[in-house]
Image (spheres, rainbow, N blue to C red):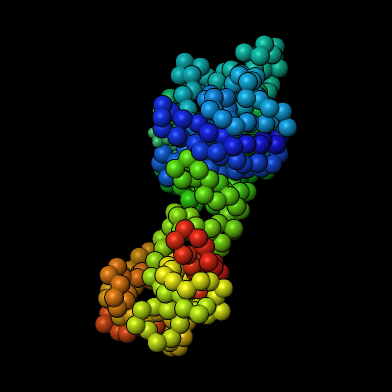
Amino acid sequence: MQIDIESISKDYGDFPALREVSLSINAGELVALLGPSGSGKTTLLRVIAGLEQPRAGRILFAGQDINNTPVQHRNVGFVFQHYALFRHMSVLDNIAFGLKVRKLPKAARRARALELLSLVQLEGLHDRFPAQLSGGQRQRVALARALAIDPAVLLLDEPFGALDAKVRKDLRRWLRALHDETGHTTVFVTHDQEEALELADRVVVMRDGRIEQIGTPEDLCLRPATPFVYGFLGDTNVVPVEIRAGAAWVSGHPAPILTGLNAADGPARLYVRPHDFRFSDQPVGAIPGVVLAIRRRLDALRVEVGMEGHHSPLEVALPLPCPDAPDPGQRVLLAPVAHGLFAGERSIFSEYEG
Ligand SMILES: Nc1ncnc2c1ncn2[C@@H]1O[C@H](COP(=O)(O)OP(=O)(O)OP(=O)(O)O)[C@@H](O)[C@H]1O
């Protein structure tokens, strides 16, 4: 079912938690709301659910304005981070709970609950109680319970937030497969970039109650619209540059880093991820520096490179094995193979060649 969010604003007292948020979610789409703590993700999810009333704006389900439809009539399924299953009920009764409320006959409830138990791959655990399950199994029961009522929309608020990294990863893949099988329109909240990029068809990046960018994971990785998105998605180096006559220059270096820019003269910032640098022997297209330190990580060497006149060193990640790693003290030229270029909040240029 298509969801349209039109210019939604929501205040808590005089604090604006959402400011004119607009977003269309296609039927069957899996959308992530991603952003730092306090950016308004949960509030937006609660407004979609009908748990919060917006101050302004409209929510449409399949083209129908549902602002005045109460939560119990919106046909939404929820899963929260600490989803409280009923402790005194078996797994099967937990899953069937919503069906009981809807007065489905007992045999039909049981059949549907068993079907869902198999969908979430927990066959055989129907008689267990929540305390006898692992965290990951509990979240899968919670999902089965949300799916039992055959919701038009599935809303997940950090559903795997409380679980350890390995279980989260497994559940993420499992949820994507489940979504592809059931085709529910799904919106999930996360502050984990990797989770959003791996799971979602589209990612909505939020900041201070506003949408900063909406795009496919590929859009966000290759064409981050703002410095905030660039920085939020992963480690990044920020290099101050000067634009002159369509070229970007690092102070004191006789060759430009970028040329052919359609940008006004003035200061700008070049954003480069640690793994997007290559060592070069050409001064054109490169940033000069001196190797300060080398640290070994699990999958890469991290090389710290000092730039003249720039106090924080650049971080370069070299995949292992790396036989030709530079030595501390060595002068190097770093060529960015992918980067974003921003003047203030505006993207001048963003490109990925590597
Ligand atoms: N019931 C409330 N009363 C007052 N302020 C609230 C209430 N709920 C949320 N807020 C505030 O609104 C802002 C947005 O909160 P929200 O929970 O939507 O953020 P979030 O992006 O989901 O954050 P987190 O990742 O920490 O859950 C925050 O600054 C929060 O303090």
- Location of residue 21 in the rendering, given as x and y in whole percent from the top left corner: 56, 39
Rendering quadrant holding ligand 1 = top left
Q: Nearer the viewer, residue 239 or 171?
A: 239
Look at the picture and state if 353 lies above or below 345.
Answer: below
> As displayed, is residue 82 above or below residue 299?
above
38 vs 325, nearest the viewer: 38
Count of number-bearing discs: 0
> Hey, which quadrant is residue 314 in on the image?
bottom left
Q: Is residue 161 left or right of residue 108?
A: left
Q: Say which residue appears at 46% left-offset and 86% top-offset.
A: 284
Point out residue 108 in the picture as x, y percentages from the top left corner.
71, 17
Q: Determine the residue positioned at 42% across, 45% down.
A: 36
Question: Residue 30's spot in the image, x, y percent?
Answer: 62, 43
- Asked if residue 233 shows in the view, the reply is no
**Rendered image quadrant of residue 151:** top right
Residue 185: x %, y % from top left: 66, 37
Question: Which residue lies at the image location 41% right of the left edge and 70% below the top edge?
Answer: 267
Task: Give the position of the C terminus as an image quadrant.
Answer: bottom right
Does residue 54 appear in this view? yes
Q: Quadrant of the N terminus?
A: top right
- 252 to 343, vertically: above or below: below
The residue at the point 43 percent across, 86 percent down is 255
